[in-house]
Amino acid sequence: MPLIVAALLFVVVLAYVNFRGISESVKTNLAMSIIELTGLALVLLIGVVVLFGGDANLSRPFQFNEGNPALLALTGAALAFFAMTGFENAANVAEETQNPSRVYPRALLGGMATAGLIYLVIAFVASMIVPTGQLAGSEVALLTVVQAGPIPFPGWLFAIIACVAITNTCLVSLITNSRIMYGMAKEGIVPRIFARTHQSRRTPLVAIIFTTIIALIMIVGVGEAGVNTLANATVAFLLAVFALVCLCALVLRRDNLDHEHYTAPTALLVLGVVVNVALLLYVLGTDLQGLIAGDVTIRSSVILVCLVMLVVGLGLYFVNNLAQRRLDSSRDGRGGS
């Protein structure tokens, strides 16, 4: 089956899971997360065997490439940022949990700490088993580690685990997109029709259909070659959004609320603004340098993709705002009927 066709069917099936309900989606997500952790546990087990077997290169994980170590760390952070977007996605379904003010902050911070630790250990294990240059040139880095390890494990089975990980990420993204559209419709930012829910499933049906169609259009539009550009554009937008969220959290301190809520440490919010802006400038600056040097084409430019998406989004926002005003004035002219 052609890759594009497989991707389209893949998204449609996950959209149906999303439509079935948040409970079904969460259970599916949990099952796939357990499978993912099994794959990571295998990599860790291989690392332990190699380490105690005396075949590990313990100096390799601490070797820097040529260049400024701080700049290299910034490059790694910008690259790894995409892997952490699932935590941002989880915020959009916090309202569908019990006692979110208490439960969600613990889940978010605990999950990020756990995932960060696992990422560091996996990176250490992978580089002490396989040369970093070989890992960098591989499209299936962890599979390369498994194949280089002393434990015989079928490559096809580990590939399935990797596919499950991709499926999990895509499902969470589809759930998030539909809930964001639903939330914006409730606030009147986009047409109210997107806030409609299915009568029996109680899921935002119109928002799910719309966001799925957008995903399908983008898959066909960018093709195989444009995936990296689209991913980098997503990272740029998220960095900007995260910086704004930290600023908003500081401004919201002025409001007095009469219910229990989580308050983030001020120092952490300030640090969040600084780090996110620095990463954003780095991502866009790297793309601009590539454009000037001719290494990046206009079609594959992250800056251009961001500008096009931003213009389209702002255009839709103002069109909806204008239509909503006319609708409200029309209702007022008829006596509010």
Image (cartoon, rainbow, N blue to C red):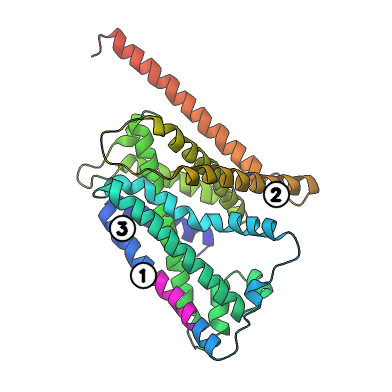
Say whether residue 93 is left or right of residue 166: left
Looking at the image, is 41 positioned above or below residue 89?
below
Q: Earlier in the sequence, mark 3 or mark 2?
A: 3
Name the kind of residue labelled 3 in the image.
Answer: Val
| Residue 224 visible (yes or no) | no
Looking at the image, is 144 positioned above or below residue 29?
below
Location of residue 121 in the rendering, given as x and y in whole percent from the top left corner = 51, 72
Residue of label 3? 26
Looking at the image, is 2 positioned above or below residue 213?
below
Q: Which residues are magenta?
A: 34-46
Q: Earlier in the sequence, mark 1 or mark 3?
A: 3
Furthest toward the left, the residue is 200
Residue of label 1? 34
Location of residue 102 in the rendering, given as x and y in whole percent from the top left corner = 29, 49
How packed is label 2: few (under 14 Cα within 10 Å), some, or many (20 or more)?
some
Residue occupying the point 45% across, 36% down:
250
Name the kind of residue labelled 2 in the image.
Answer: Thr
Say whether residue 19 is left or right of residue 315: left
How packed is label 1: few (under 14 Cα within 10 Å), some, or many (20 or more)?
few
Name the kind of residue labelled 1 in the image.
Answer: Ile
Numbered badge on residue 326: none
Residue of label 2? 286
Q: CA distance from mark 3 to mark 2?
A: 37 Å
Residue occupying the point 49% across, 56% down:
84
Q: Earlier in the sequence, mark 2 or mark 1?
A: 1
Q: Would you say residue 43 sits in the magenta stretch?
A: yes
Say whether residue 87 is left or right of residue 334: right
The foreground one among 127 and 328 is: 127
